[in-house]
Image (tube, rainbow, N blue to C red):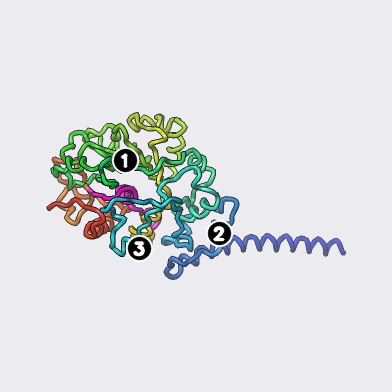
Amino acid sequence: MASKVSGRLCFLVISLTIVLAVLSWDYWLESISSSTFSGNPTEKDVLKGSISPTKAATPMPLLSRSFFKRLPHFDFEEVYDMDAKSKQTTCAQSLRNSEDQDFKKAFLPNIGLFLHKDSINMSKWNQLSHFNNPFGFMEFHHDDVMPAVKLIPKPIEPLLSPKPGSGGCVRCAVVGGAGILNGSKMGKEIDSHDYVFRMNGAVIKGYEEDVGNRTSVYVHTAHSITTSLTVFKQYGYTSVPADEDIKFVLIPEGMRDFIWLKALIKREKFNKKVNEELYAGKYNESRFYVLHQDFLRYVRNRFLMSAHSKDSLWSIVSPSAGAFTLFLALHTCDTVSAYGFMTENYKNFSNYYVQRNIKTRVAFFANHDYIQEMKLWKKLHQSKIIRLYERV
């Protein structure tokens, strides 16, 4: 009789343990859901049950985008890695000296720009695991991403330095692909800057009069560097820019970029090609940079938080490559001129400057809020933080 009672008690204890474990897991999921699905989250909202990124010694459980109906917010949303050394400038015209109060409040001149092997420890991994790509590692496995990150050498900084005789000023042009540059004859002016940024399908040959022919920094994703060869082939595009001192900057927008990155650094084949071949023979680790997720999130949070963050599109919407490039320039240069970016009269121009003999409509995609970006460029121009090229 005693053995039967003992057996029943043992069974009850085991059953109760299993039930409590299941309930605990369900509570963890429910606490995430309830804090996101009900009401309007603010910057102070914390997802109850979410593992503290500063205490865990192992990767936290994966968060899924499907848990959330809108962009979740965390109490560590605005925790960014900052450069230890303050970035000083002697340039009297530097945008860092702007008196625009909105810009001064939002702009972090010393935010860390680049990802490298020493920039992600377990605490940082767990913090970033709360944010969707490209702003973090939500849904990514630690063992899939970190082997690539651990290969990235610490970058040589600053990315750009003042030229001799410049008065300590770094003067930059950022060149987008918008049709406003078609027939602009801005090439000579663009090339007169100390440095020129370009991104994605940067078609130059045959368009020099309008877009210039110099490139100092080329910004891209794994997707854009490959698809541009197809999309712009009909316009004579055969390679990324190949200036002697060019520097390459990767935007790690998804898992594909980390796979690409690992293959690139290890000189392995990716889609039957050695990735370094796509860099026009100019690739080496000393001239290659990867933007940090903190920097990408900062650009979104403080300057380009789309209204779609409150709806079902939240997980796919992010600033465009052109926007990230322009903000990289704002944190690298003293003066910034933007060419080939959307302006209020965008309907007067074709989608791309390479479309000379055909009038096309500007293409809008669900993953970028181009109208929001256009309004920001206008505001920064009016505040004299950038000089935006406009025409009738």
Q: Secondary structure at mark 2?
A: loop
Q: Residues within 10 Å of mark 2 (few under 14, many from 20)?
A: few
The quadrant in which residue 377 appears is bottom left
Query: Depth check: 79 or 163 in front?
Result: 163
User: Quarter holding the N terminus?
Assistant: bottom right
Q: Residues within 10 Å of mark 1 (few under 14, many from 20)?
A: many
Q: Earlier in the sequence, mark 3 or mark 2?
A: 2
Q: Residue at x 36, y 51 (%)?
A: 88
Query: Depth check: 285 or 278 in front?
Result: 285
Furthest residue in direction right, as rendered: 1
Hey, what amino acid is under mark 3?
Lys
Q: Earlier in the sequence, mark 1 or mark 2?
A: 2
Q: Which residue is mark 1?
A: 217
The quadrant in which residue 98 appears is bottom left
Hey, what amino acid is under mark 1?
Val
The verdict on residue 336 being magenta is yes
Residue 184 picture location, percent across and down:
14, 44
Query: What is the number of the mark on residue 52?
Result: 2
Q: Is residue 325 above or below residue 101?
A: above
Report the magenta residues as a range.
314-338
Query: What is the number of the mark on residue 34?
Result: none
Q: Which residue is mark 3?
A: 105
Residue 164 picture location, percent across and down:
28, 40
Residue 243 falls left or right of residue 135: left
Q: Cα distance, mark 3 to mark 1?
A: 28 Å
Residue 267 picture location, percent across and down:
44, 30
